[in-house]
Image (cartoon, rainbow, N blue to C red):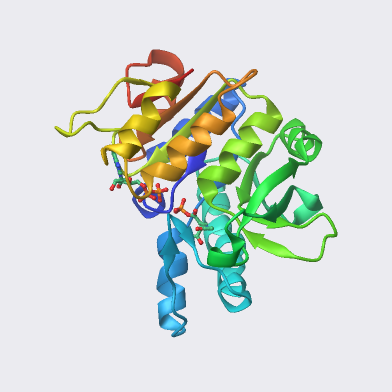
Amino acid sequence: MKCGGSTLAALPESFFADMRQLQEEGIVTVIVHGGGPAISDTLSKLGIETEFVNGLRRTTEDVLDVVEMVLSGKINKEIVRRIQLAGASALGLSGVDGQLIEAVPVSNANEVGLVGDVTKVNAELIQDVVQMGYIPVIAPVGLGADGGQRYNINADTAAGAVASHLGVEQMIVVTDVPGIMNGEKQVLPVVTVAEIEAMIQSGVIYGGMIPKVRAAIACIQGRVKEVVIVNGSEPNVLSKVLKEGGIGTRIVR
Ligand SMILES: Nc1ncnc2c1ncn2[C@@H]1O[C@H](COP(=O)(O)OP(=O)(O)O)[C@@H](O)[C@H]1O
Ligand SMILES: CC(=O)N[C@@H](CCC(=O)OP(=O)(O)O)C(=O)O
């Protein structure tokens, strides 16, 4: 599951209670989270300028310090605490811990700086954490293969990579809209990978939805059958996706 920064503060207690219920039923959840708005807030308090190029934050070493502090510190621990308060067990990690997420510079690094694309995920570590009874909560900061260089990774991209390396059946993207909407603001129940490019071209899909659909395209292969985009403030949204369906937008092959 990917939890977007747009919705984290608005997630109700029941969202985490639902997660506990699912864990008790043996449904395994792995969380990759964002935190874009909180990063932007802290950068502005510190007087560090920030800017997005095609949805990716232009990242200098100074920006990266704040990204890591906010994502791996504040946001990651907030989510872990909320899961624990709901009575479930969670363990917070970033892509740095246990070399969880290995990354290389994105192809337009000359424009965006220290932003990474995922090349490898330590799936064994995630599986071990799950085996120990914890819900892994992962912040999208990656490390170069040499272990020295950190990279800021878009959270949708990181979640898609984790989903495909784990070979899960479904990725749930929790955000602040009820799904992908068409030009008339109607939520589309199903969108195919083939339809997405045209929707980006026509401007129906824009801004923060673009990295989500691109991550979906990249991860829907092999065992990953679908990506479902849902609103986190919808009551018991996780159970509804997993048990009833008919909610949000399903992106399928
Ligand atoms: N076709 C679309 N349907 C729904 N939302 C869209 C669409 N195109 C762009 N968006 C935007 O994508 C946003 C979600 O992305 P973002 O703000 O980055 O969220 P998150 O922090 O959850 O990743 C929505 O709030 C909406 O403004
Ligand atoms: C490279 C890049 O843009 N990284 C993102 C990481 C956080 C993120 O993606 O958070 P949301 O899911 O809330 O948007 C950033 O710096 O904002």
Residue extending furthest top? 244
Judge by depth and name the residue closer to the eye, 199 or 1. Answer: 199
Judge by depth and name the residue closer to the eye, 240 or 215. Answer: 215
Left or right, 110 with respect to 96, comes to left
Left or right, 28 with respect to 46, comes to right
x then y, percent, for residue 144? 77, 57
Residue at image position (71%, 54%) is: 104
Residue extending furthest right? 146
Residue extending furthest left? 184
Left or right, 15 with respect to 226, comes to left
Q: Is residue 208 above or below residue 193?
A: below
Left or right, 133 with respect to 140, comes to right
Q: Is residue 189 above or below residue 156?
A: above
- Regarding residue 85, the answer to whether it shows in the image is no
Residue at image position (43%, 55%) is: 55
x then y, percent, for residue 107? 61, 53
